[in-house]
Image (cartoon, helix red, strand yellow):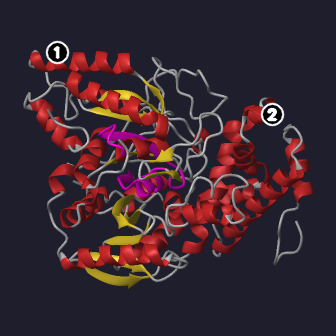
């Protein structure tokens, strides 16, 4: 019997395909682990035993009948509670959408199910996906499996914690300012924000239609490649999804990185890096060099403005999406999220339009200057050690706002640009919490990023470390 | 708005805009926070908009991403 504590998603799928275990048994093991750990972690908003076991039995029956469903046949996963499914509640981590049932299944979720995945339940998240820590006043904060006093990151907090705690083999998240990569980094797993348009957003709760991205989180690059391969690709229902062909990500994982040019920014991203984080990141870069990658210095033009340019767009679109509720149900927001979504009221329409028009110009300049010189840009995912829940709670610390800003500093710039960005764990700092590198590529270079992550995981298998939760 | 060099939105202006949109009254702290957030965002736009956008193609950002990508699979 394969143990969900140790097997990766790809290994579990292979064991199921070989008939070494049933999906029902594996799903049952994951559900038992979810029930055992959730009181400490609060990573699930709902554990859906009956639906998961029924789906697992159907998967086993299909396999017995000689009808393989796909590359995730029988594999237990979980999804952030913002992907619509008419059969289940989708709260978006909010009071306002408590009990809401979406009109149609989200495309990414439908593709995972069609590939045979078993959904264990709905994962905790920041209210309306607005916040980087994983606090949630309505459903409780999500806790980090490496130390429950620390944040799991947000907004896809449960998506990070459930994979790290070895409850789910992979999860689905969304990223409008770092919401996949921060939980991946804080929980010591991988997460990828694909290129804007690579994965359809149909049926995913919108926060900002120009900046939202959907993507997977998992323990290994191979797991991530499999999940991305399933959910990527054009959807006629999402006109912002690309018609570009989806590569076979898994087949390119073993290509190696000899001669690959890694660009290390000399401006912005490594400023204010905490020394403990810097030591771990430097060791990771040295490991990549030892495998043949070349390190070179690059400059990211206008890096200091990218996050605020993105916020100009996000705040405005969020205010439009939430306008009715801001007028009619303001008391049903937490004060923090209400202030964030209301910020758009104060952004001139001209500034919003200008930020959108500037986007292609800024992207061209970054691609010319950065990816003219290197293949992959490397930055910290987090420039600070993973902070505690207390230090990042409202009123919890005089430096709370500064800490929040530093959490977002390295990840948010790439939402405005729409570039693919992957967070890979590279060890632990002295507080016992994970540290992570962010790999950024030119548009649609997800395969390259996954290849670098896979090469690194062969050199430094941090993903085999087990968090101290039982 | 104040002068051209150090423009920051005032909380009272935020409250007035919120009233215009029909939002219930904002408390002073929230209005001040929104004013700071919006001012920072707009300042980044001003700092980046150093060339005329008059001839920029509107909108189609996805096409630009696809154009800048390497060869496909």
Q: Nearer the viewer, residue B63 or A135?
A: A135
The question of residue A50 being in magenta is answered with no
Q: Residue at x 87, y 37 (%)?
A: B24
Q: Is residue A173 magenta?
A: yes
The image quarter containing residue A3 is: top left
Comparing A22 with A409, the one in front is A22
Residue of label 1: A61
For label 2, the SS is helix
Which chain letter matches label 1?
A: A
For discs 1 and 2, the disc positioned in front in the rendered view: 1
Q: Secondary structure at mark 1?
A: helix
Which quadrant of the figure has residue A328? top right
Q: Which mark is residue A375?
A: none
In primary-sequence order, the first of circles 1 and 2 is 1
Q: Position of residue B36 (x, y in %)?
A: 78, 62
Would residue A36 be seen by someone viewing this image from the given angle?
yes
Q: Nearer the viewer, residue A328 or A282?
A: A282
* Numbered range of the magenta stretch: A165-192
Mark 1 vs mark 2, CA separation in Å: 51 Å
Query: Which quadrant, please, contains the C terminus of chain A?
Result: top left
Q: Is residue A107 left or right of residue A3?
A: right
Task: Write the residue at 51% across / 81% down.
Answer: A267
Q: How crowded is the residue under tag 2: few (<14 C-alpha within 10 Å), some, or many (20+)?
A: some
Residue B5, by quadrant, is bottom right
Q: Residue A363: x percent and y percent? A: 48, 66
Dividing the image into 4 quarters, which one contains the N terminus of chain A?
top left
- Residue A283 is situated, as x and y percent measured from the top left of the image, at 31, 77
- Seen in the picture, residue A365 relative to A390 is either above or below; the reply is below
Give the label on residue A327, or none.
2
């Amino acid at each position: 019997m394969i143990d969900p504590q140790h097997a990766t998603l790809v290994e579990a799928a292979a064991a199921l395909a070989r008939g070494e275990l049933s999906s029902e048994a594996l799903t049952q093991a994951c559900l038992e682990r979810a029930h055992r750990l959730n009181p400490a972690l609060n990573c699930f908003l709902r554990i859906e035993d009956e639906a998961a076991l029924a789906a697992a039995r159907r998967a086993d029956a299909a396999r017995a009948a000689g009808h393989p469903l796909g590359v995730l046949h029988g594999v237990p996963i979980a999804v952030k509670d913002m992907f619509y499914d008419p059969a289940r509640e989708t709260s978006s981590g909010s009071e306002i959408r408590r009990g809401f049932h979406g009109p149609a299944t989200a495309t990414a979720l439908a593709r995972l199910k069609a590939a045979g995945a078993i959904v264990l339940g709905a994962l905790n998240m920041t209210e309306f996906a607005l916040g980087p820590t994983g606090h949630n006043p309505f459903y409780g904060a999500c806790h980090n499996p490496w130390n429950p006093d620390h944040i799991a990151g947000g907004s896809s907090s449960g998506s990070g914690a459930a994979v790290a705690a070895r409850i789910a083999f992979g999860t689905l998240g969304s990223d409008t300012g770092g919401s996949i990569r921060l939980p991946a980094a804080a929980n010591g797993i991988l997460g990828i924000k694909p290129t804007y348009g690579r994965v359809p957003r149909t049926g995913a709760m919108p926060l900002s239609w120009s900046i939202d991205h959907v993507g997977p989180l998992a323990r290994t690059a191979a797991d991530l490649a499999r999940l991305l391969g399933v959910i990527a690709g054009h959807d006629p229902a999402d006109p912002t999804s690309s018609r570009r062909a989806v590569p076979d990500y898994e087949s390119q994982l073993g290509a190696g990185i000899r001669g690959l040019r890694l660009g290390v920014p000399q401006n912005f991203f490594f400023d204010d890096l905490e020394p403990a984080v810097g030591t771990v990141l430097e060791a990771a870069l040295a490991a990549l060099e030892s495998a043949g990658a070349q390190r070179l210095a690059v400059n990211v033009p206008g890096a200091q403005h990218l996050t605020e340019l993105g916020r100009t767009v996000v705040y405005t679109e969020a205010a439009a999406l939430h306008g009715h509720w801001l007028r009619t149900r303001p008391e049903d927001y937490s004060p923090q999220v209400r202030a964030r979504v209301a910020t758009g009221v104060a952004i001139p329409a001209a500034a919003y339009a200008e930020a959108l028009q500037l986007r292609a110009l800024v992207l061209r300049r970054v691609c010319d200057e950065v990816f003219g010189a290197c293949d992959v840009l490397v930055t910290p995912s987090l420039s600070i050690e993973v902070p505690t829940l207390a230090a990042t709670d409202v009123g919890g610390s005089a430096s709370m706002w500064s800490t929040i800003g530093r959490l977002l500093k390295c990840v948010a710039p790439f939402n405005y640009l729409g570039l693919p960005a992957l967070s890979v764990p590279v060890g632990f700092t002295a507080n016992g919490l994970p540290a992570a590198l962010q790999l950024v590529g030119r548009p649609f270079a997800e395969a390259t990023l996954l290849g670098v992550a896979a090469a690194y995981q062969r050199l430094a298998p941090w993903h085999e470390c087990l968090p101290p939760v039982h | 708005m104040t002068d051209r060099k150090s423009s920051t939105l005032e909380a009272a202006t935020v409250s007035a805009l919120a009233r215009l949109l029909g939002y219930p009254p904002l408390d002073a702290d929230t209005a001040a926070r929104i004013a700071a957030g919006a001012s920072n965002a707009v300042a980044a736009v001003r700092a980046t908009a150093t060339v005329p956008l008059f001839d920029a193609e509107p909108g189609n950002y996805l096409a630009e991403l696809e154009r800048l990508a390497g060869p496909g699979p």
